[in-house]
Image: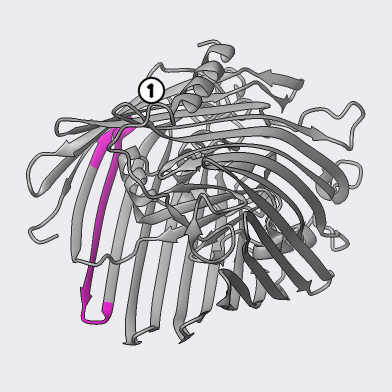
Amino acid sequence: MRDSTLISGALALAFVLPSHAAETAPTLAPIVVSATGFPQTIDDALASVSVIDRSAIAASGLHDVPTLLATLADVQVTSNGGMGQSGNVFVRGFGGPDVLVLLDGVPMNAQDSTGVAYLNNLDADQIERIEVVRGNVSAIYGSGAVGGVVLITSRRAGASPHASVGLQVGSRHTFTASANVDTTVGGTRVQAGITRDTTAGFSAANPAQFPLANPNDNGVRSTTGTASIEHDLAPGQTIGLRAYAGRGQASYDSTAYATPTDTNQSTTSQELYQLFANNRISADWHSHLQLSQQTTSNTIQNFSAFPFSSNFRTRVQQLMWKNVLKAGGGWIATGGIDLQHQSIDSSTGDIARTTRDAAAAFVGIEGTLGANQLQLNVRNDSVQGDGAHPTAYLGYGRELGHGFKAIASWSSAFNAPPLGYLYAPYYGNAGLRPEQAHSVEAGLQWARGAERVRATVFQTRATDQWLYDTATSTFENIASSRTRGLEFTAHGRVRAWQADANLTLQQPVNLAFAGNPTLQRQARTLANVGLRRTIGAVRVGAQIHYSGPRWDQSPAGPVTLGSYATVGLTAGGALNAHWDWNARVQNLLAKKYQTVWGYNPEPFGVFVGVVWHPAGS
């Protein structure tokens, strides 16, 4: 498929969504909380937000969270060999520690030498919904929200009892088993779920490009569990406890100083425990208090003639108090504090135990004056060793009539270096300064009920970025970058089809080098088209993903990774009152491409499954 053909098709689909909407289309826009910190419709959000809800997750048949995220506007995913392997998620040209990931409001980015959230270790079956905010929103969420924020909500108890057991099998000896149950008794809601994934995988490294890497298949296995209990002490007064645990093991290919008989294993574990209270202080004042601890441990082991192992274990303990106050006249104010104690250590002696404290205070206000919508958020973060960092978000919207709204915003952001960047042996630099960023964007939105079309132009510029300096063999503040672009999203119905389309045209460039070259592994063109409908008792769907060419580094120098388009198909339905079935075809056209030079992508695959629901659920 030619690039211009796919892009034109995505644009054409997006433009016809409103004019061909079916009479049976849903009339309500989804509710989001990520743009302001309190619930509002996605049409009212001034920030650029995308949502993947529980029904969309189930319909996709996917268990891999990064692959789910890649269907969203201006989100690009790279992988060193497919599901369960290390990789990166980029939002508007920024990735790694510059994309903040929150699980139930708790930062998941590790304080190790990667700064990433290890999303490949989280199974989508234990997720209720995902919201992605594109653009920097440090004024709401603090350090790390330079490219955007990924907010993940774990499974929740519903209004009525529910239970299910699912099995899925597929290509490459892939097997998934899951069980979920939730119930409500009086004022108490209980939920628990667990998912086990295993696959024999394929050779992550391409032997033609890395002839010294082990050509064996790189298998992956992981287990993800969630649990929660909430109790209503009185109307408007709720306390609860949530827990999440995930552990993944992946065989991976080492490409440096390797031999074909070497074997390598990566083990990542994550745990999150959260005690919370939701309190209605008055009719106009709602308070949320949470005390959390999140731990991430990553261990790599090399089994060869010269074996070695390495481990980094990081922990974030957080106390957050957030308040939402109806200020009258339709205005809503937010405010609170965020206190964190961060630490890093190692079971293999790779780093001495190191800690630091971070404290923040934040306030915001949002409302309308006639046809004008205003949003202002300010926040001040104080990070031990780095001083104070004030950030702000100023958004403006203007209702133009007939469903149209003009939108503009300005925002600032910062990112404190992860502890691993500061103190890891050999390459850590205790003198690193925080990154700084500023963004502007403007857009035009049309919305009617559940139909939405939005075009946004944006620019984010970051300075003092961290880059490994070969001259000093440490991280240094020597990088700066800028991303400019046009982002187009559409959601609605085309006859009987539910359709989503997005197109991103961007210029993520490196300002630290002459000529401002495009950032490594970053595509200038991204597009997605998703279609779903019900035919009789069967739900069917298709997903097309396109990425333009990107450059990457090979041992011989810079190389171009070609553009590619992949097609996925889904189907499912009810066999009877207690059994459902599902099927998914991955990479239908068996497209060969690479998101990282030398590493293979997920090949063609077929996966089928069943889900059992007992009586009464």
The residue nearer to you, when weighing 440 against 170, is 440
The spot of residue 350 in percent (x, y) is: 69, 61
Q: Is residue 342 magenta?
A: no
Question: Is residue 585 shown to the viewer in this render?
Answer: no
Judged by its main secondary structure, the magenta piece is strand
Task: Answer with the quarter of the image where residue 558 lies.
Answer: top right
The spot of residue 404 in percent (x, y) is: 57, 41
Task: Answer with the quarter of the image where residue 202 lies.
Answer: top left
Considering the numbered disc 1 on the image, is that residue within a helix, a strand or a loop?
loop
Q: Is 407 left or right of 464, judged from the image as shown?
A: left
Q: Is 166 left or right of 381, judged from the image as shown?
A: left
Q: Where does the magenta region start and end?
A: 168-188
Q: Is residue 170 magenta?
A: yes
The spot of residue 382 in percent (x, y) is: 78, 74
Q: Which residue is mark 1?
A: 604
Number of labelled discs?
Answer: 1
